[in-house]
Image (cartoon, rainbow, N blue to C red):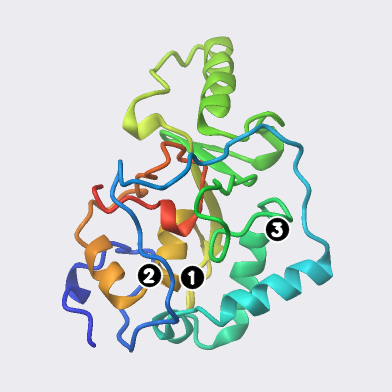
Amino acid sequence: FPCKLCAENIFGTLFGSGNGPESAALPPPRSRGQAEGKPRQRHSRPFRPRSEEELRRVVHEWMQYVHPRAIEYFNGPAALEQLLATIAARIDRNDDPIQGDEAKCVTWRGDIMCGDEYILAQDVPENADTESHAASALSWQALQTGNRGSIRNRSNRPQAVFRLVKPNEHEETVAYVNRILSFVFAAEESFDILMRLPKEPFTMSCGNQLCIHLTHISVDG
C-alpha cells in the first residue's frame, strides 16, 4: 500500500520516497531488549572478504528481496546491484545482513564516522570488529591528536558509512549503511515505523553500531 509518510521520509536528502507492494518477507527490525532466544555472537576474528564470484552470487540472492521503491529510485537494477556489491565487499564472506542468522552480528569493515570525522577503512584498526574495539582505538588516536571529546556520546559513536553518488547527481554523499539497507529491503510496514525515527543512524538493538544486520535495527530510536 502507499507509504503514508513519504513527505517525512527519514532518509531525507539521501533517498527519495517510494511506493509499492511489500517486498519478500524479511524479519522486521526489533525493539531493544526484545528476547532473542540466544545471545548474539560478536567474537574477534580476521576479516575474510568475498571473491568476485561470491560477490556476484550474494548480490543476486539479495536482489530477490529488494523493495520496488529501491529499484525505482536507482533507475533500474544496475546501480542498485553495484551498491549492494560495495556493501558485500565490506563484510566478511560468511556474514549476511539480509538472510543471515539473527543471533550473529554482521560487522562492517568499511569506512566509519565518529562525530564529524570520516575515517577510511584502511585507517581503522584491524581489530576494530566491534564498536567497543573501534571506540577504544579511536579514543587513543584522539588523545594523540588532541581531540579529547567523549567517544561514547551518541554523535561520536562509531557508525558504519560509505560514500555514494546519488542518481542524477555528481557529488559524493556520506551514507549510513543501516539506513541504506532499510530503504532497500524493509517491507512497507517496517519502513513506515522507521520513518518516524530521528534523521540519524539507526540504533542497533545488539548494542554494536558497527553491526549492519537488518534485523538488529531498533525501532525504538
Q: Position of residue 133 (x, y in %)?
A: 58, 25
Q: Quadrant of residue 179 in the image?
A: bottom left
Residue with the mark numbered 2: 15
| Mark sitting earlier along the chain (3/2) | 2
Amino acid tagged 2: Phe
Amino acid tagged 3: Ala
Circle 2 SS class:
loop
Residue with the mark numbered 1: 166
- At x 65%, y 54%, the residue is 95
When the figure is inspected, residue 93 is found, relative to residue 46, above or below; the finding is below
When the figure is inspected, residue 120 is found, relative to residue 188, above or below; the finding is above
- At x 45%, y 63%, the residue is 180
Query: Can residue 218 be seen by looking at this rendering?
Result: yes
Along the horizontal axis of the image, is 56 left or right of 215?
right
| Mark sitting earlier along the chain (3/1) | 3
Q: Residues within 10 Å of mark 1 (few under 14, many from 20)?
A: some
Q: Nearer the viewer, mark 3 or mark 1?
A: 3
| Mark sitting earlier along the chain (2/1) | 2
Marks 1 and 2: in contact by CB < 8 Å? yes
Distance from Cα at disc 3 to Cα at disc 1: 19 Å
Marks 1 and 3: in contact by CB < 8 Å? no
Amino acid tagged 1: Lys
Front-most of residues 98 and 155: 98
Circle 3 SS class:
loop
Residue with the mark numbered 3: 89
Q: Position of residue 36 (x, y in %)?
A: 40, 47
Q: Position of residue 136 (x, y in %)?
A: 54, 19
- At x 51%, y 45%, the residue is 211
Q: Position of residue 12 (x, y in %)?
A: 29, 63
